[in-house]
Structure formats: structure tokens, C-alpha cells
Image (cartoon, grey):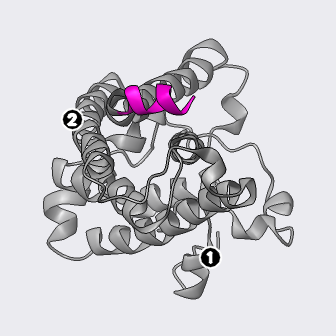
Amino acid sequence: MTHFIEKYFWAFSIFLLPALYLIVATTFYFIFYVWRKTELNGSKIQSDPLSHLQLKRELIYSFISLSIFAVTGFLVFLSYHYSVSSIYLDIYRRSIVYFGLSVVLMIAFHDMYFYWTHRLLHLPGWYEKVHSVHHRSSNPSPFTSLAFHPIEAVIQALVLPLIVVIIPSHPLAIVAFLVYMVYKNVRGHAGYEFTTSDQRNKKWNKLHSYSIHHNLHHLHGRGNYGLYFTIWDRLMKTLREE
């Protein structure tokens, strides 16, 4: 397994995230906007339909973002190749407990990184010139999740090279993190919510960011800046209370 990972690590670094995104976003779109569109309509947060113009724009920007993510993925490979990163290939070099902990650390680091870079992108100047591209989709769809201005795509894509330098990471832990990242990002932009306010307000559930949280962010253009959790929004008092 170690030899296989080492041999194909370059391909893994470049193509994994784009492939995951295309699979997950397309699956969400097919289920919610094509196959079961009528049956699930009652769970749509905003009733307005997805226009072909919005979908076309999101696909164009998403493919630009995916190209940028592929380049930063190659940076991950180079950081391993030149021993700059903390990537290790022998899974038994560290404990299985650490393997699981490393995924949690990646998620926590990314949640912090996303919150603060997202707040930056809402500052005057940054918003108008960069982040407004993403916010043109006030009623988001699965493909909104990576519909970024190229500068924003670079900012968000740099999190993975940072993670592998800071956190000792096995490639399979990186895979687990990327699967979680893509799923949560696409779900957060899907435009549908299946939980009730009572469910979301249970003790531990209150810490999670749901689709409705990010949908409100797109609708109003402020508040709910977090990605996975509401922790930073609660600490910084930017959580929308609707």
C-alpha cells in the first residue's frame, strides 16, 4: 500500500479533489434538481427555481476553481517530494488514534481558516472585486460551492498545502478530510434543508453549520461565515438567529 501511494501520489494530489467535487456536486444536482425535484420541493429553502444562466455561470467559475485546486494539489506533491511537508506514508509510523485525530485537526484548522478568510473577503474592496462573484448566487445550488473568483479560489485552495506543512498527515487521512470537506461544502450550498429548528437547537447540534445557515448567508450577504461549525460565528457574534 505504501509503495502504491508513493508511486501515484502526484496523481492523487492533482486529481482527487476535482474528482470528488464533480462526483458529489453532480450527484446532489441530479437528485435535488432533476430526479426528485418535485418530491423534495417542500424542503427547498428558497422557492425560486435555479435558472440556466446561473447554472452556466457557476459551472464556468467552478471549472476555473478546479484548475486552481489542481495546481495547489501539485504543490502538495512537491512539498512531499522535497520533504517540506509533514506527510508520512507508513500508516504505522504513528498510531491509529493519531490518524483519526489528524483528520479532526484538519477539519478544525480549515474551519478556522475559512471563517477568517471569509470575513476578509467581505471587507470593502475585497467583496466588490472578488467575493461578489460567489454571491451572485443569492439562491445557491450544489455548483455554487466552488463558483469563485480566481483570487478567492487561490485563497481557499491554499488551505491544503498549509495543512500538510503544519499537521503530520497520512494520505488516507487527507482523503477522509477532503471527502468531508467536499460533502459539507456542497451540502451547505445545495439549497435544501431536511432538519427542523428543534433538531438544530439540540445541545451538540447547535455547533454544526447546516444548509440553512449558509443559505441565509447567501440571501442576506452577511453573518454565518463558518463552514463546518457555528463555533467561530458564536464567538465573534456573527451568527444569524433566524
Q: Quadrant of the N terminus?
A: top right
Query: Could you tell me which residue is drawn at 41 percent across and 57 percent down?
Result: 164
Query: Left or right: where does residue 149 sit relative to residue 177?
Result: left
Query: Callout 1: few (<14), some (14-19), or many (20+) C-alpha neighbours within 10 Å?
Result: some
Q: Quadrant of residue 8?
A: top left
Q: Position of residue 18 (x, y in %)?
A: 38, 31
Please report the bounds of the magenta region as a residue range.
Answer: 1-9
Q: Position of residue 239 (x, y in %)?
A: 57, 76
- Above or below for 89 versus 212: above
Q: Which residue is mark 1?
A: 231
Tell me the amino acid under the disc marked 2: Ile
Task: Answer whether residue 2 is magenta in the image.
Answer: yes
Does residue 184 appear in the picture of this structure? no
Return the disc, 2 or 1, that comes first in the chain's sequence: 2
Tell me the amino acid under the disc marked 1: Ile
- Tag of residue 64: 2
Instruction: Give the CA separation, mark 2 to mark 1.
Output: 31 Å
Q: Position of residue 87 (x, y in %)?
A: 44, 53
Task: Answer whether residue 176 is magenta in the image.
Answer: no
Instruction: Count the numbered circles shown.
Output: 2
Specify the farthest residue to the top: 35
Query: Could you tell me which residue is drawn at 56 percent across and 48 percent down?
Result: 177
Does residue 100 appear in the picture of this structure? yes
